[in-house]
Amino acid sequence: MDSVILKTAIRFLLPLLLLASVFLFLRGHNEPGGGFVGGLVASGAIALYAMTCSAAAARQMVRVSPRVLIGSGLLLALGSGLAPLFFGRPFLTGLWTTVTTASLGELHPGTPLLFDLGVYCVVTGVTLVFIFSLLEE
Amino acid sequence: MFLWLWVILIAAGLAPGVSRMVGSRGGWLLALVPAGVAVCLLQQWPAVVNQQNVSAAVDWVPSLHLMVSLRLDGLSLLFGLLVTGIGALVLVYAGAYLKGDERLGRLWMFLLLFMAAMLGVVLADNLLTLFIFWELTSITSYLLIGFNSDRPESRASALQALLVTGGGGLLLLPGLLLLGFAGQSFEISELLNHADQIQQHAFYGPMLVLILLGAFTKSAQFPFHFWLPDAMAAPTPISAYLHSATMVKAGVYLVARLHPVLGGTAEWFWMIAPIGTATMVLGAVLALRATDLKQILAYATISVLGTLMMLLGIGTEATLTAALVLLVAHALYKGGLFMMAGAVDHAVHQRDIRLLGGLRSVMPATCGAALLAGISMAGILPTFGFIAKETWYEAVGSQASVPYLVASVLSNIGLVAAAGMVCITPFFGRQTDAAQQAHEGGPALWGPPVVLGIAGFCLGLLPGPFSELLAAGSTAIAGQDVSVKLKLWHGVNAALLLSLLTLAGGFLLYWQRHRLAGVITATDRFMPWGPAGAYRWLLKSVNQLARGQTAILQNGYLRYYLLMMVGLTVFSVWMALGGELSSHLDPMPFDFRIHEVMLAGLILMSAVVAVRAKTWLLSVGALGIAGYAVAGIFVLFGAPDLAMTQFVIETLTVFLFVMAFSRLPDFRRLSSVHTRRRDALIAVVAGGTITMLLLFAMTVRSDHPISAYYAAHSVPEAHGRNVVNVILVDFRALDTLGEITVLSIAAIGVYSLLMLRPAARPGSTDSSGNEADDSSRGSAQRGN
């Protein structure tokens, strides 16, 4: 697809969309958002880039093969589930710590965040596999 | 006791390494392991003989009261000695048999794995532990029979053995569960105290049938005997070990083990004794028909297995003891005979006795091994085989059950002739062409059968010390104290006369065997109608059925899949809810706001447009609008997470549709008016059903919805205010894990559909994409 408008717009849209995706992912625990929708937005952004330029260009921009994304996402989700086993807790129990920062106040990072990151990676990877396969066919 | 099993399993793990580093002589090294276990078993002899049983147990799943428990009594010790003792010899023998073959390590590994499984079967005290080891023997047997995996007949035989014995295992499990429930315990030692209660129980009949079917398939009883001769496709060390000395005796072991719990009833007698007798006679007859050395031995084994079942089925103290004596005698001579057959095969590359002869001069040691074992098989003085036959005749004769005695003598006459065919024909007479190039193998090939043969003689000459172990074994089978006094010479009595009659008949049969040829060819045409034919017919029918239903259900047309899925959903909804769907429909109050009605109208309009569109772009766009409108409804009713996801999903779906459809021509009407009317009807019915289902779902809300729990616990337990996300990543994270796994599998499916077609292989249109993929993978590795 050869469109000057899109090619110009994508240079601004892509960073914004990716930023939005990270934003959605991070706020997910307290406000609407999360790994699933975040991953979808990220892959939507990359899909737009791939349609505007080319699938090869999009692949180079992503740097990581979608298959690696899927695999590492699955491992991350599984690993965050296995981690509590070492503390004598059941599989997939959330482990939490409290971190106090100056700017953001008290934060509660825990294994569910890692799990959500795994979901994010898998969703992005799977959608990218769909998009790249279709475009390169 | 667990240590014994672990040591063998560890040896199995080391076997491939041993084969690489030491070569074929590693068999001697590996044999030390089972030999060591055998010594440990022998150390328990005094305790076991004095009825002090050794046991060990570990909790497996304590919350379900599941235990892995082992127990050593006379019967276990006897079997354990056979398994480890013959196992050690077989490991040495296998090293010589597959000398220089790179698969030797694998063979040793499988043999040791089997050994651990078999030892587990005979040591298990828990019914479920026993079952697990039982199934492990089936699986290792499958691997061993199919060892020559490049030969189709090997694979077919392995599959056949697995299907028959595995099918039996499938029946055995419910049988053992019924037994456990009826006896309120899964420990065999505990069940012994509840024998009366179990035999009165309503489950007694079904459990007996199921357990016996498991035992009969494993021990190759008629009509399941056909897998055993086919299992001879395995290399000979395997046949010697699994299919004569140990695994096929697992069924006999189980029947013996459960005799004190289940035995002694009329049902027991009538279910086991006739089947055993039929197997005994059939095996002997079929042995005479065969011409292949291993086939003859296999059918003779079936005959003996039938005898063992018959003796256990009759179930007096004398017959139980006789079964145990025969079992040991048979393991010793048949293991030796198989190894002898393997040595001949190894030297001459020929197993057909019609083409073998005069091997005595070129293979003297193997000939000696054959004669040692053959004399025991024929039951001639002074071997253990003779004692076995005497006790057998005496035990059956004292029951005054004439039919069983006659059948015993007849089958033994057949076995004597078979012994002649196996041990005399190949070694004596005119030297055949095949035999002339033969040469004696190394001591590892003829040594183990000679050892077994000599053991048979020693036990025959000095049965005294062995009697006490047999007594302990018989006590375990009978469930009460049994004293056994084995003697080689009982004086002239009825049993001895029957023995002489058997020998005379056997020699006559062997001498005149060429006259049987006519009878054999006359019966050839009945063979396809046997159980083996039934098995093949069943296998073929199952395959045909699978092919037929696949052609209908998996025909490759997407439209039929859709039709099937939608139709089945509608059908199952109506089947499950039926009249309730319509009866619960309350008229909904019409208090909709104007923008809600507008959204609904938008959905309807875009659906109509999507169906009526002439170009794909319009259709895809209309579908996208419908999706957005649905997301809008989510926004109106307060589900921002869902709405957001739906918006993104719709966007991506339109993307993907555009990418996929941009290569396709515009829509064409290829379907007939009739087909379209049918599809429309199905669509209306399906849509209507789902609408009614949703309305119905509104009326059956539970009083205590689970959402209240989630809402209450989200912040304190999961530190998140967004309940939807907390459910996804914390409360129901297991579901999410499953979903992302399914998603990944879908990606593999899409990838293989689109990229791995012959047209899409490298060198065609997408070569640039593959390069990009490779480079990105490279950078990812650098990143790591």
Image (cartoon, rainbow, N blue to C red):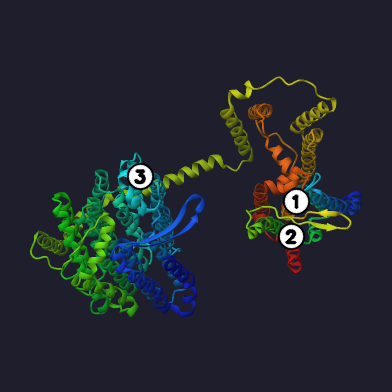
Measured Cα–Cα span from mark 3 to mark 2? 57 Å
Pick the residue in front: A15 or B204: B204
Query: What crowding class fits label 3: few (fewer than 14 Cα within 10 Å), some (14-19), or many (20 or more)?
Result: many
Q: Nearer the viewer, mark 3 or mark 1?
A: 3
Q: Earlier in the sequence, mark 1 or mark 2?
A: 2
Q: Secondary structure at mark 1?
A: helix
Measured Cα–Cα span from mark 3 to mark 1? 57 Å
Q: Which residue is mark 3?
A: B207
Q: Chain of mark 3?
A: B
Pick the residue in front: B435 or A61: A61
Residue B513 seen in the figure:
no
Query: What crowding class fits label 2: few (fewer than 14 Cα within 10 Å), some (14-19), or many (20 or more)?
Result: many
Q: Determine which of the numbered discs, if any, sits on residue A65 in the image.
A: 2
Q: Secondary structure at mark 3?
A: helix
For badge 3, the amino acid type reads Met
Q: Quadrant of residue B478?
A: bottom left
Contact between marks 1 and 2 (CB within 8 A): the answer is: no
Judge if badges 3 and 2 mark residues of a common chain.
Answer: no
Q: Which residue is mark 1?
A: A131
Q: Chain of mark 2?
A: A
Q: Residue at the location (58% across, 32% down)?
A: B572
Q: Residue at the location (43% across, 70% down)?
A: B108
